[in-house]
Image (cartoon, rainbow, N blue to C red):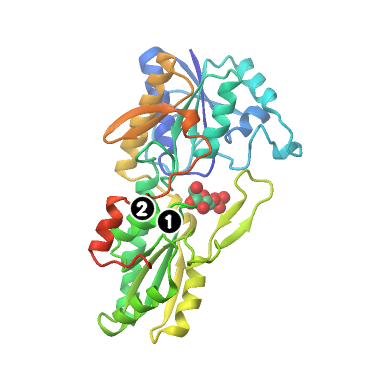
Amino acid sequence: MHVGILTGGGDCPGLNAVIRAVTLALVHECGARVTGIRRGFLGLITQEVLALDVPTVAGILAQGGTILGTHNKCDPFNYFGAAGADVSSQALAYARSLGLDALVAVGGDGTMAIAHRLSKLGLPVVGVPKTIDNDLCHTDRSFGFDSAVAVVAEALDRLETTARSHGRVMIAETMGRYAGWIALEGGLAGAADVILLPELPYRLDAVVQRCRARESREGYTLICVAEGARAEGGQLTVAQTLADSPDPLRLGGVGALLAHQLQPQLRTEVRATLLGHVQRGGSPTPFDRVLATRFGWHAAELVRAGQFGRMVALQGNSVTSVEMASVAGRNRPVPLDHPLLAAVRGLGVSLGS
Ligand code: F6P
C-alpha cells in the first residue's frame, strides 16, 4: 500500500504529531510506503514530495509547524498559479502517477472542501481536522486549539500584571476567524473580566459600564476579544484582503479599535495587544500531542479499512469519523446555549451584551 499525506491551510501545533502517527501506524501495522506531499495541495501540482519512514518522523512529535510545509492559497480547482484555472486533473494525474492508494489530508474546512471534491473525482481521501480555531463541524475538538488557548491564557496572565500594577484596561485580541472558541476558553483560563465573541455582538456602553465599575473597585480590567467580534450594528474589522486566497478576508484590529472607543470614556489608560500568530506557533501542548496522535492513528485505520471520503472526529472522548461532505466548507460557531457561556455569565464575566 502506498499512502500520501499533506497538510493544508495555516500551520498549527500538532501537524507533525499527525504526520508521525500516520506514518508509524501505516509502517508498523501493514508495512505501507508513505509519501509526504509538500506545501499542501500545491505539491500535487508542482510535484514536490518527501518520502516518510520511521527515521524521518523521529523527533518531530513536539515540533511546531509542519515538516511538509503548507499553503493556504492553493486550491487546484481555482489555481492561483494559472489565473484561477481548474488544474485538479493535473493534481489527480500526479497522485495516480505516484501510485497512491490513498491520501490523508490534514486541514481545516477549506482543505476538507478541496479533499472532498478530489474524492468525488476518484481519489481515495481521509481527512484529519486541524485548526486552532476549533470551528470545524462534527468534531468537539480539533488539534491545535488547546495549544492556542494555552498561549492566550499565558498572555492574559502576563497582561494582568501590567493591568493591576498600573491600574489599566488591558485588551488581548485573539485569533479564531468567525468563531469565538479561542477567546471564550482562553478568556476563561486567563480570568478575563470581559470576553467578546463574534457570536454575541457587543454593546460598547455595556463594556464601558463594566470597566467603570472595576475602575472604582478593583482598579483594572482585563478584556479578551476575538478577532471576529464586532459591536452591535458594527462591521467586522478586516486587516487585509487577499484577492488570490480561497478565504480572502484576514481579520484583525478589533482590539485596537475597542481601545480607541473606550479610552475617551474612562479615567484609566487602555492598551491593546494583538496576539496574532504567536497563538499558532511553537510546540503543541501534551493534550494536542495526544489528540493529534489519536487522530493520525485513526486516519491510518480508516485507510486500512478502505473507508474513504471520511474525516476523523472527536465526539465526547471517542475518536470516530464523519462524512467529509458534512464538514467541507462549513464553520462551527459557539452555540448560544453552550454551557460555557452560562458559566461565564454565572461568574459575573461580561460578554458585552
Ligand atoms: O484559521 C487559523 C487562523 O490562524 C485564524 O485564526 C486567522 O484568522 C487566520 O488563520 C490567519 O491567517 P494567515 O496566517 O493567513 O494570516
For disc 1, the marked residue is 199
Q: Position of residue 288 (x, y in %)?
A: 34, 41
Q: Between residues 198 and 97, which one lies in front from this camera angle?
A: 198
**Residue at left 42%, top 24%?**
23
Which residue is at the far left?
347
State the residue in front, 230 or 170: 230
Residue at 49% x, 55% y: name it: 277
Q: Residue at 39% of width from left, 40% of height from top?
A: 142
Residue 173 falls left or right of residue 194: right
Residue 84 percent location from the top left of the image: 73, 38
For numbered disc 1, what is the local secondary structure?
loop
Q: Which label number is shown at residue 336?
A: 2
Q: Given the image, on which type of amino acid does mark 2 rest?
A: Leu
The secondary element bearing badge 2 is classed as loop
Residue 322 drawn at (x, y percent): 41, 28
Q: Residue at x 69, y 36 (%)?
A: 79
Tag 1: residue type? Glu
> Is residue 16 in view from this perspective?
yes
Whether label 2 touches label 1, CB < 8 Å: yes
Badge 1: how crowded within 10 Å, few (<14), some, or many (20+)? some
